[in-house]
Image (spheres, grey):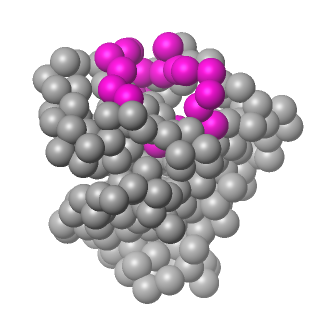
């Protein structure tokens, strides 16, 4: 249920899918750009308050324009900060979308990751590398879904900071943990299978063992 008089802002399918899994009291959207996630989360009643956070003044100025257009100055607060370094104490859920895995991990290097903090992550590349390293930050993947938007597949990882983090299997590292198996995910698996098959067809026999292992896992995933 909406808790404002504003209508939701039109944004990409990827961000709308991210919004579906937002649930908490106070959100921080890291790398907010136009603040579509921060504003929509409040408009849709997903959270009571949001912080729109960015490292650069230009994107933050665009965020402020969106906040003012939606008349959400009291509920969406813009913050100029590097990653999550100055994350406000009242934040209980964080969204990070549109960055590569290595950038996200660099943010976690300096982040106050308190137990119980929810994280919704949607890297635009190197999702496997992100999964491989989350345990080092005491972050566990609860579930995932795949989004297809403007010709690209993007994973959305729903995570939580906790003391005892499960170790991922090879399949989970490659393809995600507790993934919502739907048409989009099935299409993603077929896309990956075809891509890997073409790459391996042009490689000498005995090379590309990791790719062959990944292809075998995809073929056995239902």
Query: Residue at horizontal 22%, vertical 26%?
Result: 60
Q: Is residue 18 above or below residue 215?
A: above
Q: Is residue 207 above or below residue 221?
A: above
Q: Residue furthest front?
A: 5
Q: Position of residue 18 (x, y in %)?
A: 43, 58
Task: Judge from the rendering whether residue 164 lies leftward or rightward of residue 27; answer left or right.
Answer: right
Left or right: where 36 falls relative to 89: left
Foreground pick, 192 / 157: 157
**Which quadrant of the figure has residue 197?**
bottom left
- Rendered image quadrant of residue 143: bottom right
Q: Position of residue 14 (x, y in %)?
A: 33, 61
In the rendered image, residue 177 lying in the magenta stretch gets the answer no
The residue sitting at 49% across, 28% down in the picture is 105
Q: Residue farthest to the right?
A: 164
Please provide the residue range marked out in magenta.
77-103
Provide residue 68's location: percent of width, then percent of height: 21, 38
Q: Residue at the location (49% across, 14% down)?
A: 85
């Amino acid at each position: 249920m909406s808790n404002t008089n504003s209508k939701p802002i039109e944004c990409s399918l990827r961000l709308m899918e991210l919004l579906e899994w937002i649930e908490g009291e106070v959100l921080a959207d890291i790398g907010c750009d136009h603040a579509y996630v921060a504003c929509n989360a409040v408009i849709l009643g997903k959270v009571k308050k949001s912080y729109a956070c960015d490292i650069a003044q230009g994107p933050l100025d665009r965020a402020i324009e969106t906040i003012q257009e939606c008349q959400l100055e009291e509920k969406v607060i813009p913050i100029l900060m590097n990653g999550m370094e100055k994350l406000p104490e009242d934040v209980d859920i964080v969204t990070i979308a549109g960055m590569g895995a290595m950038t996200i991990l660099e943010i976690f290097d300096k982040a106050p990751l308190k137990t119980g903090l929810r994280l919704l992550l949607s890297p635009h590349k190197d999702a496997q590398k992100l999964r491989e390293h989350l345990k080092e930050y005491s972050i566990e993947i609860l579930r995932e879904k795949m989004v297809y938007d403007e010709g690209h597949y993007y994973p959305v990882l729903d995570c939580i900071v906790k003391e005892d983090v499960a170790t991922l299997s090879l399949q989970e590292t490659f393809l995600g943990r507790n993934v919502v198996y739907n048409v989009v995910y099935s299409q993603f698996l077929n896309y990956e299978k075809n891509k890997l098959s073409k790459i391996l067809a042009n490689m000498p026999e005995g090379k590309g063992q990791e790719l062959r292992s990944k292809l075998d896992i995809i073929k056995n995933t239902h």
